[in-house]
């Protein structure tokens, strides 16, 4: 029953590539923003928090459209990228950006929750023992944030696998170029006789998502065990 | 070590201010909780930024609001041991100890891991996960971690408060010995008068967020004689124990004292409450107390309803505490010769 055409395989491969890249690109930003929200003592923290979380509640289509305005040929950033010879819209890079923006709030939330568990006195201790700001970030905050980085990464990856609205607007639905699994399923449902293809990709989608959940659970259990050992 | 401070800091509804200059190697910061002791510690290490003022340590400026100087905590060379050890949970004991050492310039390093671990009796724990340590062990690792950075000043911020009484009594002599051995100037923050007396030479008194005065623990102990449950605690250095029947006889200057405590019979420091010393004008007969000393009154400290009687017993100082009426009845005056009776069980070993 599971029959996959070469276009389907391309969509699966592209989904994996886009989700992985989006997750890896988002991680450093997620870490920095989470640090800012967890430990930063600046004004307008609530504003920044709201701005980062906005993609969580806005329709993805809105995000996609705003990104298109920003990164399109006439857009403020798009023009700059064009002079550098980089095109984002209607390429797989566009899909990555769409997924990254949509996945960022999930990642920031997860890492921030983890960071807020870090005892501020550990950071004080590190500073008074001679470790500078970035030294402390690298040798204390980062290692203690690894479980939450993993969870955040997995959430972002899973969200990216399912991303539809923002991707279709920013990257389009070009088979072999920007057509990820959800877009491909959408195509099948609009084609007479496409039910079998849609169902096959749905199965793949379920399998992939389930795998991600199981991996997440395994990692969470491990980190819980190590936390228990610590306390 | 010389510390010059002129500071003001507002924290919520709490105003902190201090201005003093103090020199010494063993300085105490004493005051009740909420007096600003720990705030002061945090201002010194740079974890809190003063609103205005300046801090100079050994003529090196750590902070000066007018000159716009504010060294970051990692550049102040002021290490801290907090109330809780705050060991890094992702590193084992060895790597916790090395954390500060590795960040100390080679020419500043004075001790190595081995000697510090040995002095603190944590050598067998080096490969352990910090979660497997007991409270006392954790605190010793935290002290070792701070000592290894060879700081210009070590701040001990209520380091024993989280430990239970028995553990505290065990760790104080150890702390005294270790701090003496590594000779790092320190500021000892505590609300415990007995810790102040055992670990500091001079004391900065804080009250309600204000620096009050520079004094010493002995003076504070005498001032608090009437309000303290145990009165004034005499610290006696006793030596050369020998068996006398069921008791142990110790040398105390020219005197011999008999003690019933048989644990760890060796030279040491003992505590004796001023309330456990009975005074007689004439030689008492048939006495149950095993120690009877003769002494001359060298000073009288009237306080509340009681009088602290400072005795000189063959050159050794002993403070007894009597009710004011008793002092009048006995006619206690400076120069009066009295007999002091002390039970053999009244002594408690400190170190």
Image: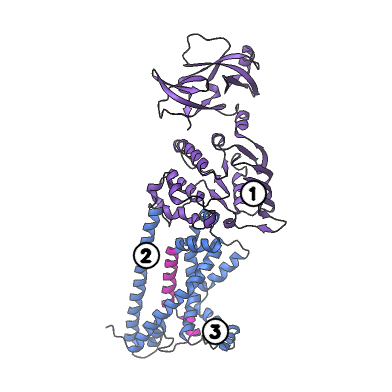
Chain colours: A blue, B purple
Q: Which mark sits nearer the N-terminus, 3 or 2? A: 3
Whole-number angstrom distance, CA of label 1 to CA of label 2: 51 Å
CB atoms of marks 3 and 2 within 8 Å: no
Magenta-drawn stretch, dominant element (helix, strand or loop): helix
Residue A195 falls in which quadrant of the image?
bottom left
| Residue B242 appears anywhere in the view | yes
Crowd class of label 2 (few under 14; some 14 to 19; many from 20; radius 10 Å): some
The question of residue B238 being in magenta is answered with no
Front residue of this view, candidates B326 and A55: B326
Which of label 1 and label 2 is nearer to you? 1
Q: Which residue is mark 3?
A: A68
Q: Which mark, by number, is residue B58?
A: 1
Residue at x-position 55% and y-position 54% = A128
Task: List the residue tagged with mark 2.
Answer: A219
Same chain? Circles 1 and 3? no
Residue that lies at the very extreme toward the left in this rendered image: A1
Q: CA distance from mark 3 to mark 2?
A: 36 Å
Please name the residue shown 45% across and 25% down the image. Answer: B240
- The chain to which mark 2 is attached is A
In this view, which residue lies farthest toward the right? B66
Q: Chain of mark 3?
A: A
As drawn, is A227 to the left or to the right of B342?
Answer: left
Dot in front, 3 or 2: 2
The span shown in magenta is A146-174
Label 1 – label 3 distance at C-alpha: 61 Å
Q: Nearer the viewer, residue B344 or A119?
A: B344
Above or below B226: residue A93:
below
Mark 1 falls within which chain?
Answer: B
**CB under 8 Å between callouts 1 and 2?**
no
Q: Same subunit under labels 3 and 2?
A: yes
């Amino acid at each position: 029953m599971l029959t996959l055409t070469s276009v389907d395989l391309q969509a699966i491969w592209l989904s994996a590539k886009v989700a992985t890249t989006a997750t890896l690109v988002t991680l450093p930003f997620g870490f920095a923003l989470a640090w800012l929200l967890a430990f930063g003592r600046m004004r307008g923290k609530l504003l920044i928090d709201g701005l980062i979380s906005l993609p969580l509640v806005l329709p993805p289509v809105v995000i996609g459209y705003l990104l298109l305005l920003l990164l399109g040929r006439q857009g403020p950033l798009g023009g700059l990228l064009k002079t550098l010879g980089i095109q984002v819209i209607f390429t797989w890079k566009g899909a990555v950006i769409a997924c990254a923006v949509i996945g960022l709030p999930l990642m920031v939330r997860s890492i921030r929750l983890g960071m807020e568990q870090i005892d501020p006195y550990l950071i004080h201790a590190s500073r008074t023992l001679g470790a500078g700001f970035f030294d402390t970030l690298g040798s204390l905050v980062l290692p203690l944030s690894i479980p939450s980085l993993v969870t955040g990464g997995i959430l972002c990856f899973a969200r990216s696998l399912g991303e539809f609205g923002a991707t279709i607007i920013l990257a389009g639905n070009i088979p072999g170029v920007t057509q990820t699994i959800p877009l491909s399923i959408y195509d099948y449902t609009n084609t007479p006789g496409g039910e079998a293809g849609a169902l096959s990709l749905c199965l793949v989608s379920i399998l992939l998502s389930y795998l991600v959940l199981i991996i997440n659970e395994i990692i969470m259990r491990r980190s819980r065990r190590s936390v228990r050992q610590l306390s | 070590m010389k510390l010059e401070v002129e500071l003001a800091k507002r924290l919520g509804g709490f105003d902190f201010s201090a201005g003093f200059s103090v020199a010494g190697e063993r300085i105490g910061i004493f005051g009740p909780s909420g007096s600003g002791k720990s705030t002061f510690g945090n201002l010194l290490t740079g974890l809190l930024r003063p609103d205005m003022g300046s801090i100079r340590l050994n003529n090196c400026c750590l902070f000066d609001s007018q000159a716009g100087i504010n060294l970051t905590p990692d550049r102040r060379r002021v290490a801290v041991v907090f109330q809780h050890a705050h060991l890094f949970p992702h590193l084992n004991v060895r790597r916790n100890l090395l954390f500060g050492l590795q960040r100390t310039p080679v020419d500043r390093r004075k001790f190595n891991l081995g000697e510090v671990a040995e002095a603190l009796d944590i050598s067998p724990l080096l490969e352990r996960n910090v979660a497997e340590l007991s409270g006392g062990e954790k605190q010793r690792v935290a002290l070792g971690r701070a000592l290894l950075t060879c700081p210009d000043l070590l701040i001990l911020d209520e380091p024993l408060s989280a430990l239970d009484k028995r553990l505290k009594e065990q760790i104080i002599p150890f702390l005294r010995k270790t701090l003496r051995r590594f000779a790092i100037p320190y500021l000892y923050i505590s609300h415990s008068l007995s810790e102040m007396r055992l670990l500091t030479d001079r004391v900065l008194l804080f009250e309600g967020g204000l620096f009050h005065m520079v004094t010493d623990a002995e003076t504070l102990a005498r001032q608090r004689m009437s309000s303290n449950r145990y009165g004034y605690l005499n610290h006696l250095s006793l030596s050369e124990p020998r068996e006398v029947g069921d008791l142990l006889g110790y040398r105390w200057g020219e005197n011999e004292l008999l003690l019933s405590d048989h644990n760890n019979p060796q030279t040491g420091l003992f505590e004796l409450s001023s309330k456990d010393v009975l005074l007689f004008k004439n030689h008492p007969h048939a006495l149950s107390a095993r120690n009877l000393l003769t002494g001359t009154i060298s000073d009288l400290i009237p306080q509340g309803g009681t009088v602290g009687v400072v005795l000189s017993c063959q050159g050794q100082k002993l403070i007894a505490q009597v009710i004011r009426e008793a002092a009048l009845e006995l006619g206690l005056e400076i120069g009066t010769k009295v007999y002091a009776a002390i039970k053999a069980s009244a002594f408690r070993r400190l170190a």
